[in-house]
Amino acid sequence: MAPIGWGIAGTGRIARTVLPDFIHVPDAHVAAVASRTREHAESFADLAFSTLPDHPRPRAYASYAEMLEDPDVDVVYVATPHPQHKPIALAALAAGKAILVEKSFAATHAGASEIVEAARAKGLFAMEGIWSRFLPVIREMDLAVAAGEIGEVTSVQGDLFALRDFDPEDRLFNPELGGGATLDLGVYAINFAVGRLGSPTRVTAAGSLFPNGVDADVAMLLEHRGERTATLAVSLRADGPGRMAIHGTHGWIEVEPRFHHPSRIVVHRRGVIPQVHEAPQSGRGYSHELIEVGQCLRDGRTESTIMPLDDTLEVSRVMQSVLEQVGVTHHDDEELPHG
């Protein structure tokens, strides 16, 4: 089978961070890149050519629509700010392309639902790019939980703090670009909880806002069936370890900081010496989700079993509830971004 051709929509921080990991992805190549300006697209194409020596230089497009017409693009990695995810993802699906959409999947739950409905209606592959789900040590952790090493899971506790200087023009803080702690940090914590406890039956949240109205700090309590809970906290204006723990009736598992890209976990059981599990990631850690996309496409699957679309929808529903409770409203763009 021919190598899978990737098209990268967006040339910002996350796209440049993920790019080097394509060197660890077999039978894949970056065929094209698109940005709103020719200069940015050409610059990224040059970076790809120098970073991935065994790959040909990707074609550079000054519009997303043009890239979606490229017959060598099989799957589009949507790496733009959150509000732009929906129109790009929908346009890619309309063009018959598979999609990997960077977390958060969309700026709103309605936007996420629209993308999922379109992908399922067309029978095309779609997945949220939340790299932590695919890391080897997290996969080991899930196997340990499934094997009953800590008994029945009762709760999840964790935090993800990332102190940043407030700059209203930066994407992290810009309300027009989906800024704020929930969509950038809360998505990791909520995803972790949903992945281990399922859908919460009740969501309670409180938080504080930056002067421009985006969320700075958020504390969450998720209540799940069977009297299980997740207590989570995220912040863009304070530092913290970035820890996560899964508690059970026979012990607990500590995911060593920072939990969204760990290389080791520690299993604690009553009366037993703690067991350390280490599983280094490949490259920067993003290669594992890229490999999953390729494997799904080759197997003819339209969803990943590791990061199913129902989980994406559930996480987006919880985030929507959290944002409403702390007083933040986001929107999804309706049209393709252009220069």
Image: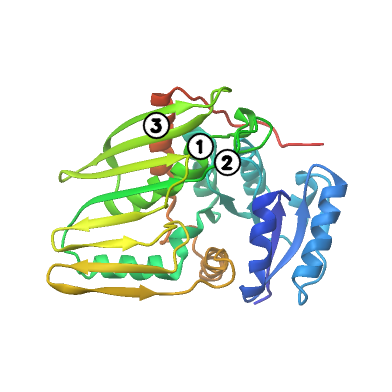
- Marks 1 and 2, how far apart at CA: 6 Å
Q: In this view of the protein, which residue sits in the foreground, 53 or 121? A: 53
Q: In this view of the protein, which residue sits in the foreground, 146 or 32? A: 146
Residue where numbered disc 3 is placed: 322
Q: How many numbered callouts?
A: 3
Query: Which secondary structure lies at badge 3?
Result: helix
**Quadrant (top left, top right, bottom left, bottom right) of the N terminus:** bottom right
Residue where numbered disc 1 is placed: 237
Residue where numbered disc 2 is placed: 164
Query: Which secondary structure lies at badge 1?
Result: loop
Q: Is the C-beta separation of discs 2 and 3 under 8 Å?
A: no
Residue 157 vs 177, above or below: the answer is: below
What kind of residue is marked 3?
Val
Query: Which secondary structure lies at badge 2?
Result: loop
Q: Residues within 10 Å of mark 2 (few under 14, many from 20)?
A: few
Residue at image position (58%, 66%) is 284
What kind of residue is marked 2?
Arg
Residue 69 visible in the shown view: no
Q: Quadrant of residue 326?
A: top left
Mark in front: 2 vs 3: 2
Residue at image position (71%, 57%) is 7
Q: Position of residue 54 (x, y in %)?
A: 76, 77
What kind of residue is marked 1?
Arg
Residue 275 vs 181, above or below: the answer is: below
Residue at image position (63%, 34%) is 177
Q: Position of residue 49 (x, y in %)?
A: 81, 68
Q: Which of the marked residues, 2 or 3, is nearer the chain's N terminus?
A: 2
Q: Which of the marked residues, 1 or 2, is nearer the chain's N terminus?
A: 2
Q: Position of residue 108 (x, y in %)?
A: 50, 33
**Quadrant (top left, top right, bottom left, bottom right) of the C terminus:** top right
